[in-house]
Image: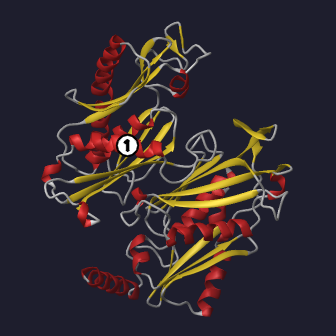
Amino acid sequence: MENDIIKHIKRNYLLDLLNRNQRIDGREFLARRPIEIKSDVISTAEGSALVQLGDTQVLAGTKFEVVEPFPSDPTTGVFITNVEFLPLASNQFEPGPPDENSIEFARVVDRGLRSAELVDLNSFYIEEGKVLGLFLDLYVLDYGGNLFDAGYLAGMAALKSTRMPKIEEASIIRGEYTGKLNINENVVSFTFVKIGNHILLDPNLYEEKLMDSRITIALTKEHIVAMQKGGNGTFKKTDVQKLVEFGFDNYDSLSNLLG
Amino acid sequence: MEKDIKLIVDGKRLDGRDLFDLRKPFVLKLGVLKNADGSAYIEWGKNKIVVGVFGPNPVFPRHLEDPNNMIIRCQYSMTTFCSLEEHGRNGPSRRSIEISKVIREALEQIVLRKHYPKTMLEVYITVLQAEGGTRTASLTAAVAALVDAGIPLKTLAGAVSMGKIDGKIVADLGKEEDNYGQSDIPMAFTKEGDLLLLQMDGKLTKQEFFNALDKGYEIVNKKIIKAIRDAVEEKYSEEINKKLEL
């Protein structure tokens, strides 16, 4: 009850600001928070990156394993993305099995990276019954809103820094590498929230908690590769079209950060 | 464990350290996370560990509440890519549950828990990169995170892993030394020399153990606790930058 009242007051305050064309942290409606990407931060991983998007911090790491292929695809490698919401990232995250939000987050990132066919899974074939499995794990270290965009950046940067393991007699020689994983292009995402009639890019935690609805659009240079709408509110069809245009128009500015 | 490599040559260890030198780098930073009430990041050798503390908060679920004391919850966990070996599994292992317990019990001895009855303190530890000695590095970072959270403590504390390699007592075992050495003795002390954590495996004579205990305390007091004090001073003497740098 008390929380409802506080939420109501906070929301009115936010709407009041937005009606005067102001955001709570002083940004333009379609401006992002500062982004820092640092690759190769974990030497035990095959690839890794720490991304800071405003107060949000996400660490991504990759590992290779020799695994059995799926019976339906006996010569194709495996690529699995997983997300952990660490309890130290927010007092909203409880230790224990992943909740619906972390599963949604993991699946949206996984879909985008998979749809873009970034990784040539056919090159992961080793011998009959054995293929390489690439595991991309994202850890939310600090939850400051907009995990999706931070997650895509961290996942992409970790993949781009990934080293191919040396393989002898169908097993991985740990700590020895044979060049880099080939990544065809960059996937980046744009997440917007709608509060009242206002649409904001890259919501901070305060905005995300008070939003009506959220939409994430993940893109390569030419294609949309994943979308996800969340929250209780709606978006107008014309708004979604504009947001997709915005994404393609601003693709380079985000993609260039990944190099 | 059988060893076939020499771990000490001409008085120097594999990485060139003297017997009682700590691994480098040794970096401790406070306030690296925004949401946590207190946080710390430690880089100790190749270990990279982040700790976040929440509290004191109301106890949930309520029936765990202690009318006279603050309760402490502690969870030690590792990322799936923190070791050079295979991709790790998510979720607690028997090992991580034990480590969570011994760290929690150590922290319970230094927090002034009676001042905050009916509350809980949550201590979350994540090992991002591991190279042996993660429990002692975690405990040291956890103490620093408690200071950062403004939790009243009786005293400061720190931890180090002593060990025996090639028949000699040494400080701060590296990964190979842990694998091929004769004994591993993680220990934590308060500034005053009270033992908060002690574990041991392998074989030691009485005299070797006493020696390790004396040296361990000296290192904790002179180096580890000093590093915590320095990190606190550094944080409060500079402008606060709540970001993690790996």
Q: Nearer the viewer, residue B91 or A120?
A: B91
Residue A158: x %, y % from top left: 63, 53
Q: Residue furthest top?
A: B10
Chain under numbered label 1: B
Q: Nearer the viewer, residue A249 or A175?
A: A175
Q: Is residue B118 above or below residue A219?
A: above
> Which color scheme did the rendering employ for the protein?
secondary structure
Any part of residue B167 in sight? yes
Residue A132: x %, y % from top left: 76, 50
Any part of residue A162 in sight? no
* Amino acid on which the number 1 mark rests in the picture: Lys
Q: Nearer the viewer, residue A171 or A185?
A: A171
Residue linked to disc 1: B29
Q: Quadrant of residue B210?
A: top left
Q: Quadrant of residue B105?
A: top left
Q: Is residue B100 above or below residue A174?
A: below
Horizontally, residue A12 falls left or right of residue A75, namely: left
Horizontally, residue A148 falls left or right of residue B191, namely: right
Task: Give the residue at x 41% y 37%.
Answer: B135
Horizontally, residue B110 falls left or right of residue A16, namely: left
Q: Quadrant of the N terminus of chain B?
A: top right
Residue A74: x %, y % from top left: 84, 58
Q: Nearer the viewer, residue A221 or B208?
A: B208
The local secondary structure at tag 1 comes to: strand
Task: Give the residue at x 82% y 58%.
Answer: A76
Report how many numbered discs are placed on residues in the image. Answer: 1
Say few, some or many: other residues with alpha carbon within 10 Å of mark 1 (under 14 / 14 to 19 / 20 or more): many
Q: Is residue A4 above or below residue B146?
A: below
